Image: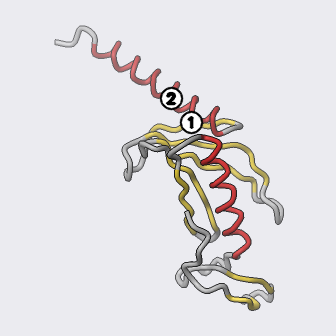
Amino acid sequence: MSSERSWPVRSTTDSEGRAGDFYCSPGCGGNCTWEAYQRCVIASEILARELGEGWTTEIHENIGWFWSVISPCGRLNVCPSYQYLAKSPKLLGYHVSLGVPGHTSSRWGRGKTAKIAITDVLNRTRAEVNELVVLMQGLR
């Protein structure tokens, strides 16, 4: 992910009288800031490097900036979980989805760290596979 701008940064005052450098898509309306976008870029790049070679970042906007990192195979998507009670969000942990790239996943895991969350989703998936093997034994 690049820190290049897709939209112009507007140094202005929003509809509620807040001043700042707003960086928000024309259709969003969330008064997203360049600072928040940059925090997402930096945090996602740090986690991608921590998880290893081939992990990529994804930043998106939906009444605020959000980020995730994607595994080299594209089947794991790691997202932070934040508590938004103050100006600076508090990181609570991570959640991970496992699935076919480009499709919604029904397999999820969570943990205090990204690596714990990845282990959680893999363990949950293995348990599900084992249950299905037992269920299918003896079918006629």
Nearer to the camera, 1 or 37: 1
Quarter placement of the N terminus: bottom right
Nearer-the-camera pick, 88 or 46: 46
- Tell me the quarter of the image containing the C terminus: top left
**Are the residues tagged 2 and 1 within 8 Å (C-beta)?**
yes
Q: Residues within 10 Å of mark 1 (few under 14, many from 20)?
A: many
Amino acid residing under circle 1: Gly
Judging by the rendered image, the residue that carries numbered circle 1 is 109
At 78% across and 83% down in the image, what residue appears?
A: 20
Callout 2 environment at 10 Å: few (<14), some (14 to 19), or many (20+)? Answer: some
Residue hosting label 2: 122
Q: Is mark 1 on a helix, strand or loop?
A: strand
Name the residue at 57% across, 46% down: 78
Q: Distance between the residues labelled 2 and 1?
A: 8 Å
Q: Quadrant of residue 120?
A: top right
Q: Is mark 2 on a helix, strand or loop?
A: helix
Q: Where is residue 70 in the image (x, y as percent from the top left)?
A: 51, 48
Q: Residue pushed farthest top?
A: 138
Determine whether 40 is above or below 129 in the image: below
